[in-house]
Image: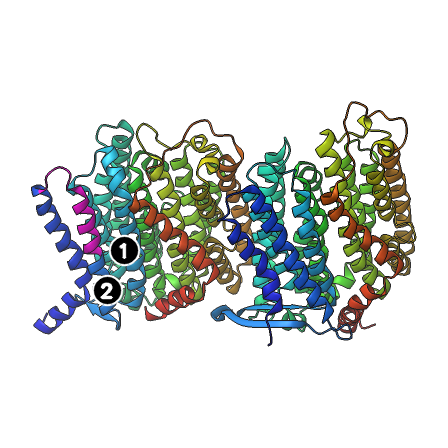
Amino acid sequence: MTAVALFQSVLASLPEIVVITGACILLILGQFLRKGQEPFLVWASVAVVLIAAFVTLMLAGEVRPAYTGMFIADRFAVFFKFVFYLATVLTFLLSQRYAETEGIGSSEYYVLLLLALSGMMIMASATDLLSVYVGVELMAICTYVLTGFLRREQRSNEAALKYVILGSVSTGIFLYGVSLVYGLTGTTQLDAMAAAVTGDPPDPGLLLAVVFIVAGLVFKVGAVPFHMWIPDVYEGAPTTITAFMSVGPKAAGFAVILRVFLNPLFATSDVWIIVAVIAVVTMALGSFVALVQDNFKRLLAYSSIAHAGFAIFGVVAGGADGIASVMLYLLIYSFMNLGIFGTVIMMRNGDFSGEIIEDYAGFAKSHPGLALLMLLYLFSLAGIPPTAGFFAKFYVLVALVERGFVMLAVIAVLLSAVAAYFYIRIVMVIYMREPERAFDPALTPLVRATLAFTAVGTIGIGLFPAWFLRLAQHSVFGG
Amino acid sequence: MGFPLLSLIVFTPVAGAAVLMFLRRDDAVRWTALGVTILDLALCVAMLASFDTTTHEMQFTERRPWVPALGITYALGIDGISALFVFLTALLGWICVLASWAAIDRKVKEFMVSLLVMQALMLGVFCALDLFLFYVFWEAMLIPMYLIIGVWGGDGRVYAAFKFFLYTLAGSLLFLIGVIVLYFHGGETFDILALTAQDLPFQVQSWLFFAFLVAFAVKVPMVPVHTWLPDAHVQAPTAGSIILAGVLLKMGAYGFLRFSLPMLPQASVHYSTLMLALSALAIVYGGLLALAQDDLKKLVAYSSISHMGFVTLGIFALNLRGLEGGILQMFNHGVTTGALFLFVGLIYERTHTRSMAEYGGLMKAAPVYTAFLALFVLSAMALPGTNSFVGELLVLSGGFAADLAIGATAVLGALLGAAYLLGMYRKVALGPASVARFSIRDVNAREMAAILPLAAFVLWVGLYPKPFLDIIDASAKHLLMQVHGEGSGQ
């Protein structure tokens, strides 16, 4: 590698470098912080992400392949990186008060989140199965630790342990698929792989490899049959981390899935049938099991499974519109899901956990404004216009019908009618029950800002989707 | 593109709702809501005053790009079919505010906001000229309506609200798929007029016809997907019932007129017998159910099913008299049934019972009330001189022209209507005064203000329907030309 190429590579990966460097500096600085200076950590972490975002934006002008085909900085990656930045910054803002209440506000918490962010960014930019692996592991290991951050709580420990074991197995499966691919094609680069495969019909070994790789990736987005970890981990983890995981790592998983499916090797095979089945089953399971949940976090866990299923429908559709629809879906999902999680996090105050749905009975009576926000997020998650959630679903359906998958579209909407039931059930509890207790949400200015921002996103993208749609479509073609 | 009158009509209630958010006193909220709805009505009257009845073209059109990448535009416009419903929605809007004046005594602000948002969305549905925009309005209505039923309704309100929400959602999601399929078959546009001009293969038309039918039939509602209606009506507050019966039910029929007939003409002709049979079934079955009710609200709710059967019968008779009668009957039903729900609400506020068995001899206690009730009951029975007579007569003559047996069944339904309506009036108003334990006062000025305009329309349409038929005429003729001209080759 020449010096120029090295420089180009460093330049292309500058955002990642910024985040990792920032994380290291914060780790050191964190040791010198005295009690009561935790807010500094929040602002420093936000600053790191903002600098990275700025750098990303500066470099977004052109496509930059780097590290001899392992890595690429293109518009596709930029789009996803901004979803990650959004998720991370909002998580930071939500964390401050919550971390104080739970006693987890040490510098490691923020450092690990930043490192997870860098892992996700690498995933979005990876063009080689091995760099995908590096990104996935970096992200996963950080989230394992973060899940278990409530050290004194059994739930949290159990969740972390489950997550580590299942996550490792899935990584193993993924690596096994990669090794098969390498054995058959002699490369792990996505582009080179496609070029190496010319035989028709394709090698059955390759099909096996594809199945393994799909399985490993599907674990990260929590699709059936690799969804088992989600409810337990989401319930046990600190709620801020749950919020983060439901948006960031999930989007990162989809970034990789899309990148892999952009690859002709997969696009020409019949692997879409597997993916279609996964989509249907995932959405069905998420929607139906969520119907009987009493715990808000578990319900949101199953809801996130259902949403992953819907997004996978976009992957099935494929093509430019299919990919753009998944990207737009994830962006919109970030807004509304962080919004609803923000309200759950805000309820955690003193001894009040706010994790049981019944806890919200009559919330609208004392806090009409906050109740209205929850209403907005919940109807958006249910996909009712004019919220953004509707447009996200609508565009996926358009992509499906465009490719002639009308039956799949019908299945998708029928299942989302089922899903609507459990969202409006929460609305019912909030609006149509009599309050049993006084509410005292921890409404710090930072939480306020987060809720306002997500609400504007949820309603704004719904009313004026054109710009965001163009952004998503533009980002596809850049890849 | 001139002055955006339709946008103004649609978004005035939204602006009003935004203002309400900042008001604190309940009375201020009520008066502001009333002012906003009256202003909206005034705008609608201004719109009708300059409405050109000689053309079937869309009028007052507005068009702005919204999501250009998908061919979605913000397009509004009205023709003779939608004009009456825009007016009806605005008319019932302020009557709803008056009807809720005293009946809603908690969370008044939230209620009025829901009501105004609801009105804006309903107006939007009737004005939209873009399928996507139409769908957004159509589906967004679920949110305020769910809240109106679920928060301010009766004892079983939660169940009723859920049922209403899920029925309509499931129906309209299939419609959404139909819309997207239509989008790709019709050259990637959501423009309703452009899609109307498409000539789709019969196979596609059939599929779409049934996808649309599910959504519209739930809204109308047609038998057998009507079961949400009695629950929703009975549990909803008076204003909710008026909106449901007066406007929401019309949207299903409006969907047939705006989409099924012009866009899928061959399928509409092909399946018209099925639709006529379903309509006749709804007329008779709804009538029989109404006959068996003791609850006043349920009776009116089931009578709605029967009356909407007349509307769909007229539409799918696919001849001019049926079509014009059906459209006029939609307007009439909105006025008459809206008034009947208002009357049930008025009496319920006083006695807190809706059971007919507990009433009797109301004529002595509240003579003005019973006199007007008589007018609306007679109107619902389609007595000559009232609005429904004109509409029903046209529908029946259209129905007989289309199919003798269907027409005969519909007449039977009209007889049933007389039976349950007169029975209701006898039990409530006549007979010995068993209401001694209620202290009933007659209607006051505010209630009178809600009743009088409706009564005026009952008589106006009944005695001189020409202005109303004039509005419908050109568009109805054009619609029939679209159906038969390009359809069966007649």
Q: Residue furthest top?
A: B437
Q: Are marks 2 and 1 on the same chain?
A: yes
Residue, disc 2 = A56
Asked whether residue B475 is in view, the answer is yes
Question: Identity of the amino acid at label 2?
Answer: Thr
**Crowdedness of circle 2 by 10 Å Cα count: few (<14), some, many (20+)?**
many
The picture quadrant where one finds residue A355 is top left
Is B36 left, or right, of A327 in this rendering?
right
Q: Main secondary structure of the magenta part?
A: helix
Query: Is residue A349 depicted above or below A401 in this figure?
Result: above
Is B62 left, or right, of A141 in this rendering?
right
Query: Which residue lies at the image location 80% right of the left edge and 46% below the top edge?
Result: B306
Is label 2 in contact with label 1 (beta carbons under 8 Å)?
yes
Horizontal and vertical percent position of residue B16: 56, 55
Element type at marker 1? Answer: helix
Foreground of the two, A99 or B195: A99
Query: Which residue lies at the image location 55% right of the left edge and 39% below the top edge?
Result: B107
Magenta region: A33-49
The picture quadrant where one finds residue B148 is top right
How far is mark 2 from mark 1, CA to CA?
Answer: 10 Å
Residue, disc 1 = A85
Foreground of the two, B440 or A161: B440
Q: Which quadrant does the N terminus of chain A fall into?
A: bottom left
Q: Is residue A41 magenta?
A: yes
Q: Chain of mark 2?
A: A
Q: Which quadrant does the C terminus of chain A fall into?
A: bottom left
Q: Chain of mark 1?
A: A
